[in-house]
Image (cartoon, rainbow, N blue to C red):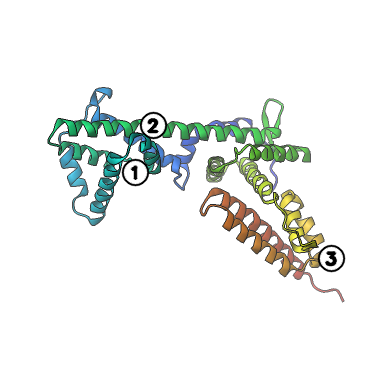
Amino acid sequence: MAPASCAMASSFSLTITASAADLHVKSSCPQVWSRVKCGFRACDFARQLWFPSFGVSTVSRRPTLHIAASFGAGTEKAFKTTVEIDRLIDNLRSTEYQNMAQLVAENVLAFDAPFWLRLAARADLCTSDDDREEYEELASQIMNIVERIVSKTKEKIESSTDVLKAIIKPLSEGDDEIVWPPRNQATLVEMRKEVEKREMESFLDESFLSEVSAQLRQAKEDNDKPGLVAILQKVLQLYAACLLCKRSYATKDGVVDEAEELLEQVLDADEDKWNDLLRKGLTYGGGSVQSEDFFKAIDRRIERTLMRTENGSYQQRVLAEYIREIETRAQALIAAFQSIPPTS
């Protein structure tokens, strides 16, 4: 991307302070948060279904049995869904109250409209008031727990947005105007220090990475904020560099592996310095590291990363993509060297 110096105060501020939940809903890849929000809206539906006096509109529960029955009729998939819901309801009914929150948290995405319809249908089948009251109490407990989970999730996402603001604050000039690219290297150093500080404080978790990734996707889709895209990419790069440079593999039994050493130098450097480091380190540019050895070191680092991070996590994705960016840069540089005709 060509450097684009831009005054981004209004548009950038708007993006960062926008509702994190809305950003997740707008993203092309649905996130857990947006699905939890759907479950929360299902709880609103459930409150009207079970406790109509609390809502503005009234929903009659008596016909629910017929609705739920027709919902599950006709397809094998719907029947299996009903069986799964019944199994979850049975588990919830048999769970002690002190263990209820854990079970609800583990199945938080399952509390959608079909779940509440099925629960109401089962209550309608009860022949005694005591059994019906038991279902009503169960519904109330689940709703309250789901609402607490949603509230905590929202707080965590808002906290992640605050952390992101703190990391990019060194880019602010004047009246909090964000300028990209930065005018001097000291700005990036300050950003790196803030990333390292927040990582030590355990703020840079999956929630944070999810938030940054969601905003990055949105900025790319909008296609009118190149500066914002570059800033968010830089935040992820700094995060990856911080984590990948925590441990060195360059020295083993007192022997220095030059390929690993070169890779670690590139991992720790700003992206603008990658080409210079690679040219000086690889044999094509007069260095001592064979390209085959360098790419083997990259493969080993990617393998370690995949083994030591949760499969499918944002952390795994960000770290692996960062290493592969270096691999792509090295391949392009080597291809450029090879295209130069030999001098006679």
* Residue at image mark 3: 286
Contact (Cβ within 8 Å) of mark 1 with mark 3: no
SS category of the residue bearing label 1: helix
Q: Earlier in the sequence, mark 2 or mark 3?
A: 2
Q: Is residue 239 visible?
A: yes
* Residue at image mark 1: 110
Classed neighbour count for the residue bearing mark 2: other residues with Cα under 10 Å, few (<14), some (14–19), many (≥20): some
Foreground tag (2 vs 3): 2
Residue appearing at x 72%, y 54% in the figure: 248
Residue 113 placed where, x, y %? 29, 40
Q: Quadrant of residue 249?
A: bottom right
Residue 219 placed where, x, y %? 56, 42
Contact (Cβ within 8 Å) of mark 2 with mark 1: no
SS category of the residue bearing label 2: helix
Report the Cα–Cα distance between label 2 and label 3: 62 Å
Mark 3: amino acid:
Gly
Report the Cα–Cα distance between label 1 and label 3: 60 Å
Residue 272 placed where, x, y %? 74, 50
* Residue at image mark 2: 147
In the image as oriented, which residue stretches furthest toward the right?
344
Q: How many marks?
A: 3
Mark 1: amino acid:
Ala
Up-down relation of residue 13 to residue 253 (above or below): above
Q: Earlier in the sequence, mark 2 or mark 1?
A: 1
